[in-house]
Image (tube, rainbow, N blue to C red):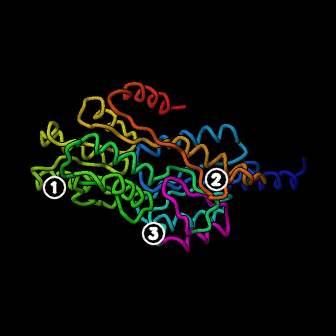
Amino acid sequence: MNRRQFNANLAAASLAAAALAAGVRPAAAQQKKLLAFVVNVSADFWTIARRGIEKANKEHPEFEMQMIIPAQASAADQRRILDELIARQAAGIAISAINPASSTDALNRAASQALLFTTDSDAPASNRVVYIGTDNVDAGRVAGAQMKKALPKGGKAMMFVGTMDADNARERVQGIRETLKDSNIEILDVRTDDSDFARAKRNAEDTLSRYADLGLMVGLWAYNTPQIYQAVKQAGREKTVKIVGFDEDALTLRGVADGTIDSTVVQQPFEFGYQSMKGMVRYLGGDKAWVPANKQIIVPTRVIDSSNVAEFQAFMKQILRPS
């Protein structure tokens, strides 16, 4: 090897080292198409969805699949994430839209550059290809039936959620109100917390302090029910205040097991993650026939109560075991 060849090889090696140091991946890795799953808040609920994404990625290693959690649970932060994903030339995006009405332009901009799905909370006015998740009006009806079961003679109830700007929140409340319209259960209000866990706890504590005759508290998002559970336990109101919740947070399931929480309506976030990623792979591969005419893939809910909580806790332990 002459000196000129040696210097050329040395320069090439230096450039390669610099690229690695800057975080630039080899060409083979760069060729992987990015599929992103954008959630609405940091919560254990989405850890379950992550397991579904991981399963899909094992089946399709030719793609890079990522879950992205906003630093702040806000529509503005989600819009920033969408812009970043467009800049990264993501091939597909699935998103749980926090405030679809204020984000339609951003969602449509993303849909013009990448394949766009919604999950958990829909954005039907956008150009999304399909929604994969719960029928939230029906889930509200299921919760309403559980509320009637918890308070068969009626009474006062308070509901709690992050924001009523999200479609899933509005639709769950709609389903609950439909189910309770001929009952003696009075819904005092829907307290919101902007996905601030500490504020959610304060909302529950304030409600317990303000209403001595409160009969029922209902958590509409995954983190609400654990905050309600802790507030009721700390206030010593377990025997007088019933709780109905949503989702499968470990503390919620503990509350069902110890009898403090009457029941919780659980979704299937594992399927949200798995089916969203598998669906995007199929669609990008040219298979579009699986998308129904109404552009909705509904994942059913189930009720967890004292009769099946132990079995469900064992199932969740298996699902959440690190892969």
Q: Is 124 one of the magenta-colored residues?
A: yes
Of the numbered discs in the image, which one, if any, rests on residue 206?
1
Q: Which residue is mark 3?
A: 76
Which marked residue is nearer to the observer: mark 2 or mark 1? 1
| SS for callout 3 | helix
Task: Assess disc 2: are there few (<14), some (14-19) or many (≥20) residues with their C-alpha within 10 Å of its C-alpha.
Answer: many
Marked residue nearer the N-terminal end (3 or 1): 3
Report if the CB atoms under discs 3 and 2 are less than 8 Å apart: no
Q: Kindly identify the residue that appears in the image at 23 percent across and 42 percent down.
A: 152
Task: Assess disc 3: are there few (<14), some (14-19) or many (≥20) residues with their C-alpha within 10 Å of its C-alpha.
Answer: some
Disc 1 residue type (three-letter): Asp
Taking 82 as reference, is 309 above or below it? above
| SS for callout 1 | helix
Q: Position of residue 300 (x, y in %)?
A: 51, 43
Q: Which residue is mark 2?
A: 35
How far, Cα to Cα, is label 3 from label 2? 21 Å
Q: Nearer the viewer, residue 176 or 279?
A: 176
Q: Position of residue 131 (x, y in %)?
A: 58, 56
Taking 108 as reference, is 13 above or below it? above
Taking 104 as reference, is 192 above or below it? above
Report if the CB atoms under discs 3 and 1 are less than 8 Å apart: no
Q: Position of residue 83 (x, y in %)?
A: 57, 68
